[in-house]
Amino acid sequence: MEVIKFSIPEIIFGIGSINYVGLCAKQLGAKKIFLVSDPGLERAGWVSKIIDLLQRDNLQYSYYSDVITNPRDFQVH
């Protein structure tokens, strides 16, 4: 098996950290965001908040919501 390493440049957390989603995406070189969520996060308002922030930062996105909470590996594929 091939060894693969993923490095995260930084982790931002805490009150208000969601406001940095667009900036972080741009710093990673993102051109179009693939946003995946489930109905529970939609009802909580997190999805609309993220979409507003992506639009504010002029980032294109595709949204996929046909996901169950805690999906199995075969459902992700």
Image (tube, grey):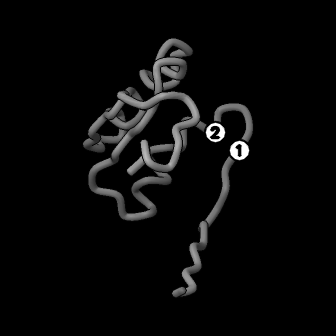
Above or below 3: residue 66: above
Above or below 62: residue 68: above
Label 2, secondary structure: give it. Answer: helix
Are dots 1 and 2 in contact, CB under 8 Å? yes
Q: Residue at x 39, y 26 (%)?
A: 52
**Residue of label 2:** 17
Q: Amino acid at mark 1?
A: Phe
Above or below 48: residue 21: below
> How many badges with numbers are in the image?
2
Label 1, secondary structure: give it. Answer: loop
Compared across the picture, whether 9 is left or right of 61 comes to right
Place residue 61 in its image quadrant.
top left
Q: Residue at x 50, y 53 (%)?
A: 24
Q: Residue at x 47, y 26 (%)?
A: 38
Report x, y in % for residue 34: 34, 45
Q: CA distance from mark 1 to mark 2?
A: 5 Å
Above or below 60: residue 29: below
Q: Residue at x 37, y 28 (%)?
A: 65
Residue 70 tag number: none
Q: Residues within 10 Å of mark 1 (few under 14, many from 20)?
A: few
Q: Amino acid at mark 2?
A: Ser
Report x, y in % for residue 64: 33, 34
Quarter in which the N terminus is drawn: bottom right
Place residue 44 in its image quadrant.
top right
Q: In the image as oriented, which residue stretches furthest toward the top?
A: 43
Q: In the image as oriented, which residue stretches furthest toward the right?
A: 14
Residue 13 tag number: 1
Compared across the picture, whether 48 is left or right of 34 comes to right
